[in-house]
Image (cartoon, rainbow, N blue to C red):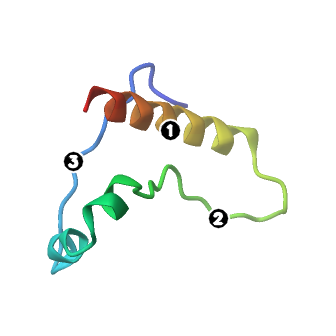
Amino acid sequence: MLAKTAELKSLIWMGSSLEDLRAFPEQIRKDAVYILHCFNKKCQRTRQQDKTIASARYQVVQRFRSMQ
């Protein structure tokens, strides 16, 4: 289950990943893609629990972006 307070986790850059990201134009980096939740799908329907997790994590991203 989800914790009551979600927070951002630290990120470890490997290889040239940070330099590769910095090579993108600034506007592209502002329109980032967030991986909110990963899971293996075994059927066509997405479980409600997976939707809830992704939604809660997206809310954390929105709060973080509004503070910048």
Q: Which residue matches tag 3?
A: 10
Q: CA distance from mark 1 to mark 2?
A: 19 Å
Q: Looking at the picture, how far across and down is residue 61, in whole percent? A: 41, 37
Q: Which residue matches tag 1?
A: 58
Give the secondary structure at mark 3: loop
Q: Which mark is residue 40?
A: 2
Mark 1 or mark 2: which is in front? Answer: 1
Residue type indicated by callout 2: Asn
Q: Characterize the local packing of mark 2: few (<14), some (14-19) or many (20 or more) Cα atoms within 10 angstroms.
A: few
Q: Which mark is residue 32?
A: none
**Vertical side of 63 occupied by 43: above or below:** below
The answer to whether residue 56 is left or right of residue 7 is: right
**Vertical side of 68 occupied by 13: above or below:** below
**Does the CB distance between marks 1 and 3 fall below 8 Å?**
no
Give the secondary structure at mark 1: helix
**Vertical side of 16 occupied by 27: above or below:** above
